[in-house]
Amino acid sequence: MRCYAFTRPLLRSPLSSKLLSQSCRPRCQPFSLSAASPLIEPALGVTHSFIESLHGTTHLPWIACVPLTAIIVRAVLITPLAIYTRRIQQRQAALRPLLFAWTHHFRRTAVIASSEAALKKEIKKLHRAKRKELYKRWHCTRWRLFLPFTQLPLFLVVIETLRRMCGIPGGLLGLFTERSNNIKDVSVDSSREEVLTSLNSSTTKDIFFEPSLAFEGGLWFPDLLLPDPWLVLPFILSGTLFANIHLNTRRSTKTSEQMQGGQKPSIYYSRLTRAFKFAALLIGPVTLQVPSAILVYWITSSTVGLCQTMLLDKFMPVESKRQKEISDRGPPRLT
């Protein structure tokens, strides 16, 4: 016995056709970490819970809680990577006299080339191969020096969480183009009740949004949801970023000169350094519309990173005094 299933033909009404056409349209979403991957949303939730727990446990206002968050993140997650990277640098510095000796050996035993430039190129090639061999043997390969850059995803996750807590739409790009639309007709002299009334009547639907940021600021920026009214924080951020880049590139340039027999770094490295410094100076004008809460976190994180580098230079120097004397003499010049 066979059973036949008869289905009614699909009758499309004008309303259903309109809904179907709207559902088939490609949707353009703003650049946002939460929209990029479903794995980011749990990370944002954990970060938001941590910040909320810290605020509720310490009973500190947001003007103190946001910098405290940056200090804890730096101390717990980023400082161990910085210490590990500094130990790798110390190990490479300890191998530098051996590399100098090998450079002298290569110069004595190198095949006589047709020109001085060809001889110099051959010695550099042998030097790079020996350096790679020694670094691999002593577990201090150069790629380990880039481990601190793994903090960038963590930094973006925290910034995205703060953006949603401030009620800024449009994803990360909205930080530089849009302002918080959760406060209307509220002046700096408004009372706490007026601010809460305005925030409760807003149309925001983000569960991360934190209304108390509007009246737990300090100094000249009492409202952390809005940009700095005096435009001071953006340029403080530029200064701290520029100081960080200048301090790190100066040490890297000195190390590069010592490793290359007293020669100056390549023109590409110099241009890259100038580009980073120019970008640091450009951060100030670009972040004029960024909420004060995000600027406070960014400034604190950058300042802690600067202090961290200075402390490592003092208590964990890359070279000891004896190694520094040898490095200052340098290998035989490749001229």
Image (cartoon, grey):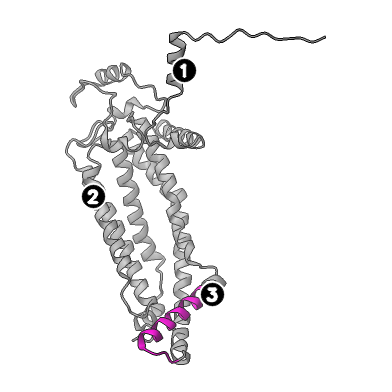
The residue under the point 24% across, 43% down is 286
The residue singled out by tag 1 in the image is 20
Quadrant containing the C terminus in the rendered view: bottom left
Q: Position of residue 120 (x, y in %)?
A: 39, 84
The residue singled out by tag 3 in the image is 133
Q: Is residue 120 magenta?
A: yes
Determine whether the residue tagged by mark 2 lies in a helix, strand or loop.
Answer: helix
User: In the rendered image, which quarter is residue 231 located in?
Assistant: top left
What label sits on residue 131 in the rendered view? Answer: none
Start and end of the magenta stretch? Answer: 112-134
Q: Amino acid at mark 1?
A: Leu
Q: Position of residue 272 (x, y in %)?
A: 31, 61
Query: Dot 1: few (<14), some (14–19), or many (≥20) neighbours within 10 Å?
Result: few
Nearest to the observer: residue 171 or residue 223? 171
Q: Amino acid at mark 3?
A: Glu
Helix, strand or loop: magenta stretch: helix
Query: Dot 2: few (<14), some (14–19), or many (≥20) neighbours within 10 Å?
Result: some
Nearest to the observer: residue 308 or residue 203? 203
The residue singled out by tag 2 in the image is 282
The residue under the point 22% across, 35% down is 221
